[in-house]
Image (cartoon, helix red, strand yellow):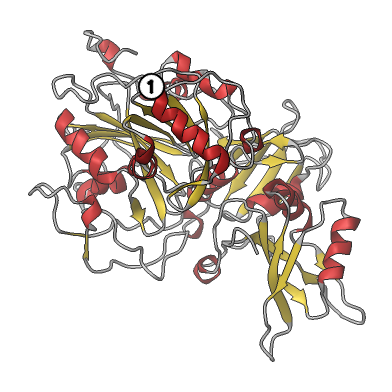
């Protein structure tokens, strides 16, 4: 939809259209993130290699694209914002515009002329270029100019809607939270949240100036310390239409729209405090003291308070009567021969309790996964969508189903349906247990624990060989306490895909000890370490 449309009806969307709008804003590629470019730039990703090796080990230009003032940057870390790129690349010449690509860890950088872009790409072929401490890879873009979203720099243009992508959302994201985040910077009028492929939202401010201030102040900020990172772009629609007020949409100019408890939406005050120390991943903890807003996110105006309070995440519904709406994930792209219910459980249980898994007979390679609550589904979507397992890329999204129900015909226990609601391998069954989980995106390093003291590297290698998964390349065991009856440590694989496949197969493997009465359950999860 053009932002210059004069028809008020064309500027409004019914709630059901927001998901379709979000899809139209995507680049159409597998990674499925928001892209606010023109059609020629939307074709960018189709021509860019899908593997960083195509760029050469030093980031060189092996992909044959003609010289362009626009450079395509890959291999960025999640926390990178426009300012980091400007700081690292301005030494090559004047930069006109930077466009981030949320979730892809990529960006387009437009230099003033091809001389400057040549310096950048040529330098990267022989020397590594680091963005925010991580090496990035460079190539010329197929576009000659980055198309700016309409009206982003013109205060009279009327673009006052921002598109927010929330990365690493370990805590619940609701309209209350986003209102608390955005309103101290500029008056918020409407919010709509999407939860299909990751967590994204559109926030409409009262003026374009307020939207500009919010983007400048909040882009790259963490709502909670170390997670829920905001990546902000200008949205295409110029107005949002909200038909009801709930956790996922709110019109602050119309509080009578299916109103909840009066004032509930405005009790929380702002952002960027540390999350409560007793709360991790599933909503435990109490209010903490006011914390100073870091200078980086203060605009130096009276509109932004110097002291703000963090919004409290909501308590997991798992401990309050079972799953709620949105607690079912749909995953497609599963290998039909190598993936079963137990292996789906092994992967999804890292992000929340898994209640049931059911493979859909009408859609091969697709399963429904009912989890303990909607936030577990959000974490699974965020971390597992687009991950490759056994050569197939997973597509994970929120299902419209409220629960998973087995069919009436007999089904093999581990073939097309399995109930895990009473499984001891669920890791979020209590507040104490949930607080011990380290929720991480897939990586090439796995953390193992709960194995017998007799377990060593050779036994692990034999385990990989017996189960037909790739062998790890590095092994590290942590020093055990004298009273400990189990071991823990780290295993590193050559690639992330190999580590994911090994976890899917080996997680919860029963390790038997000679003359031992009960087997040990091998437990695996993704490590915070990137390499050993």
Q: Is residue 409 left or right of residue 293?
A: right
Which residue occupies the foreground of this view, 519 or 391? 391
Residue position marked by numbered label 1 in the rendering: 146
Q: Is residue 236 left or right of residue 172?
A: left
174 to 524, vertically: above or below:
above
Q: Is residue 489 left or right of residue 86?
A: right
The answer to whether residue 197 is visible is: no
Which residue occupies the foreground of this view, 383 or 116? 116
- Indicate the position of residue 377 as horizontal and vertical percent values: 54, 46
391 to 35, vertically: above or below:
below
**Which residue is situated farthest in the left direction here?**
302
Which residue is found at the position 66% from the left and 87% from the top? 481
- Indicate the position of residue 287 as horizontal and vertical percent values: 28, 66
182 to 99, vertically: above or below:
below
Which residue occupies the foreground of this view, 437 or 375? 437
Q: Secondary structure at mark 1?
A: loop
- Indicate the position of residue 190 as horizontal and vertical percent values: 24, 33
Which residue is found at the position 33% from the left and 25% from the top? 112
Query: Which quadrant is the C terminus positioned in?
Result: bottom right
- Indicate the position of residue 205 as horizontal and vertical percent values: 20, 33
Q: How many marks?
A: 1
The answer to whether residue 247 is visible is: yes
Which residue occupies the foreground of this view, 320 or 165? 165
207 to 247, vertically: above or below:
above
Query: Which quadrant is the N terminus positioned in?
Result: top left
Which residue is found at the position 78% from the left and 81% from the top? 453
- Mark 1 neighbour class, 10 Å CA radius: few under 14, some 14 to 19, many 20 or more: many
Q: Is residue 317 left or right of residue 474?
A: left
């Amino acid at each position: 939809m053009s932002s210059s449309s004069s028809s008020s009806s064309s500027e409004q969307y019914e709630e059901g259209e927001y998901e379709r709008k979000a899809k139209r804003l995507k680049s159409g590629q597998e990674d499925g993130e928001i892209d606010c470019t023109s059609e020629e730039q939307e074709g960018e990703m189709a021509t860019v290699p899908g593997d960083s090796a195509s760029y050469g080990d030093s980031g060189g230009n092996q992909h044959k694209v003609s010289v362009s003032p626009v450079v395509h940057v890959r291999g960025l870390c999640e926390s990178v914002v426009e300012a980091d790129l400007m700081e690292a690349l301005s030494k090559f010449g004047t930069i006109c515009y930077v466009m981030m690509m949320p979730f892809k860890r990529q960006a387009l950088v437009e230099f003033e002329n091809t001389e400057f872009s040549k310096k950048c790409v040529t330098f990267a072929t022989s020397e590594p270029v680091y963005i925010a401490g991580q090496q990035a890879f460079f190539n010329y873009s197929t576009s000659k100019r980055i198309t700016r979203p309409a009206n982003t720099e013109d205060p009279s243009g009327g673009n006052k809607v921002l598109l927010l992508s929330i990365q690493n959302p370990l805590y619940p994201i609701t309209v209350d939270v986003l209102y608390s985040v955005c309103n101290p910077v500029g008056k918020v009028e409407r919010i709509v949240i999407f939860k299909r492929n990751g967590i994204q939202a559109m926030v409409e401010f009262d003026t374009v100036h307020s939207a500009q201030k919010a983007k400048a102040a909040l882009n790259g900020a963490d709502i909670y310390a170390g997670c829920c990172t905001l990546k902000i772009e200008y949205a295409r629609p110029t107005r949002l239409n909200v038909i009801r007020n709930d956790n996922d949409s709110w019109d602050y100019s119309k509080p009578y729209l299916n109103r909840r408890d009066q004032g509930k939406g405005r009790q929380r005050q702002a952002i960027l405090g540390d999350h409560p120390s007793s709360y991790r991943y599933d909503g435990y903890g109490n209010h903490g003291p006011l914390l100073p807003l870091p200078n980086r996110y203060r605009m130096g105006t009276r509109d932004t308070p110097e002291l703000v309070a963090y919004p409290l995440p909501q308590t997991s519904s798992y401990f309050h009567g079972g799953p709620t709406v949105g607690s079912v994930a749909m995953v497609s792209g599963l290998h039909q021969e190598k993936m079963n219910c137990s292996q789906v459980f092994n992967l999804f249980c890292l992000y929340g309790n898994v209640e049931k898994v059911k493979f859909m007979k009408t859609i091969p390679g697709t399963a429904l996964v009912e989890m303990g609550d909607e936030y577990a589904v959000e974490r699974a979507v965020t971390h597992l969508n687009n991950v490759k397992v056994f050569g197939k890329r997973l597509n994970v999204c929120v299902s419209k189903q409220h629960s998973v129900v087995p069919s009436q015909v007999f089904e093999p226990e581990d073939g097309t349906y399995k109930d895990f609601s009473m499984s001891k391998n669920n890791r979020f069954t209590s507040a104490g247990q949930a607080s011990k989980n380290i929720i991480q995106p897939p990586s090439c390093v796995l953390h193992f624990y709960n194995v017998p003291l007799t377990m060593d590297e050779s036994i692990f290698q034999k385990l990989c060989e017996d189960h037909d998964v790739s062998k790890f390349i590095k092994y590290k065991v942590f020093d055990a306490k004298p009273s400990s009856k189990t071991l823990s440590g780290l295993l590193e694989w050559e690639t992330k895909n190999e580590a994911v496949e090994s976890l899917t197969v080996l997680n919860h493997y029963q390790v038997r000890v000679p003359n031992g009465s009960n087997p040990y359950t091998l437990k695996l999860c993704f490590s915070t370490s990137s390499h050993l």
